[in-house]
Amino acid sequence: MARHDGVRVDRIITRGEFLIDGQRFTVDNNIWLVGDASEVLVIDAAHDPSVIMAAIEGRRVSMIVATHGHNDHINAAVELAERVQAPVALCQADLMLWEMVYPGRPPDLQLADGQQIPIAGGGWLHVLHTPGHSPGGVCLYGVINGEPVLFSGDTLFRGGPGATGRSFSDFPTLLNSIRRRLLTLPQETVVHTGHGDDTTIGTEALEYDQWIVRGH
């Protein structure tokens, strides 16, 4: 748990299956809760709504944000939304991925590039459209109590960009998104990822040229 003045950031880890192109993988997902003692924003409701509910600790949920539409980032979203009476938001460009999990039940809200999502306790998270891992992938950037923070979903990890080579993904598009939208952020920005450990923008920027060479 990290505290930024009145804002608290919690990481919850859940385990489940990621399904893509007929393949199954067991994965650990990071779920991020951002807010204060009374209200919280949920980022990427994965696998187990009961675990997320316990971490919410009775707070009001303002919104459930999906950084993209892969099943391992949304498969607890609708049940959680029903339990806490909160809307689920997704970028429209990932609707085809969402419909693979929830046919006939669209997201409640559409995320748009440049949109500002308020954080209980102070500040905003800005939606950055970063396609490549999926067409509608987004990251959320904010400066909380003077500290820049990015919630990167599967766009950027510690050690490189998210996976491509699967349906609806494109490596050059992902690299372009990272170069234009993320590496231009302050170098000290802490990156809270969708899987694995935190990193910083400055750390990952050092390796960008190597990603191109490796075709990561």
Image: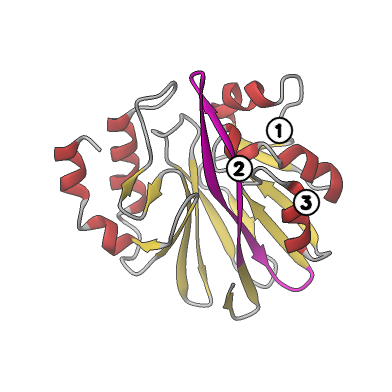
Residue 111 in sight: no
Q: Is residue 67 left or right of residue 52?
A: left
- Mark 3 lies on residue: 50
Circle 1: residue type: Pro
- At mark 3, the secondary structure is helix
Decide: marks 1, 2 in contact (CB < 8 A)? Answer: yes
128 in magenta = no
Q: Quadrant of the N terminus?
A: bottom right
Residue 66's disc is 2
Q: Who is closer to the viewer here, 15 or 109?
A: 15
25 in magenta = yes
Question: Real-space Cα distance between discs 3 and 2?
Answer: 18 Å
Q: Quadrant of the C terminus?
A: top left
Q: Is residue 72 left or right of residue 160?
A: right
Question: Real-space Cα distance between discs 1 and 3?
Answer: 20 Å
Mark 2 Cα within 10 Å, few/some/many (few <14, many 20+)? many
